């Protein structure tokens, strides 16, 4: 089954009290639980919220769904005890004549549905700091085929319990940046250059550094970009377009080298510190500062989180050694 289209609707449910807004379809089959957690449950106003949403099978048997990805997604936020505001996204799936393969979640296991920033919560964030609650609801596609319905199949909606989120008032340079951009310092990517020039050590600058510039965030890709430009130059295929592209990459790398160390010194516990270090590693490698790039990757690899960042650090080091930019490790 493939998705024919993606339809996003904004449902500003400011008048709803009590229960989280839900879709109409009733759940059928062994029901999983939906869990939402924040990397940090306290953020400054205007700062993106990093959250993780997982589907957990707490039953004694397997749970199957039509497709791994929910066709319906509803994210809601409210002042604690107040009215819910929601945004719903749903997909229009293309239904084939035969049932698709089912996605099976074994007992006791989880399936990560989202892992990263919540654009909705960041966009909606109120100017008034305080205590809030966030809830997520997802829906899985109904069984619409003539074939017998599998006994382990779950269809319909499942909703998480509300989880607390505290929004703090920005202070110092954060408040200056917050006020200068009408309480939405990260709303317009076109203004990131101004944000980085005027408020380079504000908390918002860290997110802008990751979302602006031409050089890839992941250092293995940044190195490939650099080498691709050089290969074309060696082959005599370097034209004006390539030259302009190289200049943009160099400018992006130079800005990362100039700004990221100062930002990390001001915010050593930045929630996306590992990703910023990887961007810095790619920038250093662009200027052949391979040992310094290696140091940044080693810092990332010493962190317990692992995940995508650790894989990227390992991939960069392996690529740099393969190309002879770094010495190979003994025994490899």
Image (spheres, helix red, strand yellow):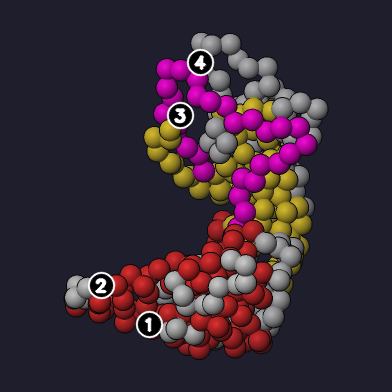
Residue matched to label 3: 1
Residue matched to label 4: 145
Badge 1 vs badge 2, beta-carbon distance below 8 Å: no
Q: Residue at x 68, y 45 (%)?
A: 54
Q: Earlier in the sequence, mark 4 or mark 1?
A: 4
Q: Residues within 10 Å of mark 3 (few under 14, many from 20)?
A: some
Q: Measured from the top left, where is residue 141 in percent x and y?
A: 55, 28
Q: Quadrant of residue 253?
A: bottom left
Q: Residues within 10 Å of mark 1 (few under 14, many from 20)?
A: some
* Closer mark to the observer between disc 4 and disc 3: 3
Cα–Cα span, label 4 and label 1: 55 Å
Badge 4 vs badge 2, beta-carbon distance below 8 Å: no
96 within the magenta span? yes
Q: Measured from the top left, where is residue 228 in percent x and y?
A: 33, 70
Looking at the rendered structure, the secondary structure element under dot 3 is: loop
* Closer mark to the observer between disc 3 and disc 1: 1
Residue matched to label 1: 250
Query: Can you see residue 210?
Result: no
- In front: 199, or 30? 30
Which of the labelled discs sits on residue 87, or is there none? none
Cα–Cα span, label 3 and label 2: 41 Å
Badge 4 vs badge 1, beta-carbon distance below 8 Å: no
Residue matched to label 2: 232
Looking at the rendered structure, the secondary structure element under dot 4 is: loop
Cα–Cα span, label 4 and label 3: 12 Å
Q: Measured from the top left, where is residue 255 in percent x and y?
A: 46, 85
* Closer mark to the observer between disc 3 and disc 2: 2
Instruction: Tell me which segment is drawn in magenta.
Output: 89-116
Looking at the rendered structure, the secondary structure element under dot 1 is: helix
Q: Earlier in the sequence, mark 3 or mark 1?
A: 3
Q: Please give left or right for residue 221 compared with residue 309 in the image.
A: left
* Closer mark to the observer between disc 4 and disc 2: 2
């Amino acid at each position: 089954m493939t998705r024919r289209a993606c339809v996003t609707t904004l449902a500003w449910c400011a008048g709803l009290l009590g229960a989280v807004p839900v879709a109409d379809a009733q759940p059928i089959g062994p029901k999983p639980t939906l869990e939402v957690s924040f990397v940090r449950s306290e953020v400054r106003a205007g700062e993106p919220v990093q959250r993780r949403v997982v589907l957990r099978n707490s039953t004694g048997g397997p749970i199957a769904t039509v497709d791994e990805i929910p066709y319906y997604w509803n994210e809601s936020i409210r002042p604690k005890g107040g009215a819910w505001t929601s945004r719903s996204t749903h997909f229009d799936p293309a239904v084939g004549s035969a049932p698709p393969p089912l996605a099976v979640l074994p007992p006791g296991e989880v399936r990560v549905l989202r892992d990263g920033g919540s654009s909705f919560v960041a966009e909606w964030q109120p100017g008034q700091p305080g205590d809030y609650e966030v809830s997520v609801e997802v829906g899985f596609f109904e069984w619409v085929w003539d074939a017998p319905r599998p006994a382990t199949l779950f269809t319909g909606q499942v909703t998480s319990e509300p989880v607390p989120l505290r929004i703090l008032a920005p202070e110092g340079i954060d408040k200056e940046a917050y006020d200068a951009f009408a309480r939405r310092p990260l709303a317009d990517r076109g203004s990131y250059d101004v944000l980085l020039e005027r408020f380079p050590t504000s908390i918002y600058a860290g997110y802008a550094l990751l979302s602006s510039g031409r050089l890839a965030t992941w250092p293995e890709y940044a190195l490939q970009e650099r080498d691709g430009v050089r290969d074309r130059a060696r082959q005599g295929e370097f034209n004006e377009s390539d030259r302009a592209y190289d200049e943009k990459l160099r400018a992006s790398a130079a800005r990362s080298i100039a700004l990221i160390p100062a930002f990390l010194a001001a915010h050593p516990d930045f929630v996306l510190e590992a990703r910023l270090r990887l961007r810095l590693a790619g920038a250093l490698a662009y200027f052949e500062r391979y040992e310094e790039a290696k140091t940044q990757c080693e810092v990332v690899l010493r962190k317990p989180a692992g995940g995508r960042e650790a894989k990227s650090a390992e991939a960069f080091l392996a690529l740099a050694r393969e190309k002879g930019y770094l010495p190979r490790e003994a025994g490899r």
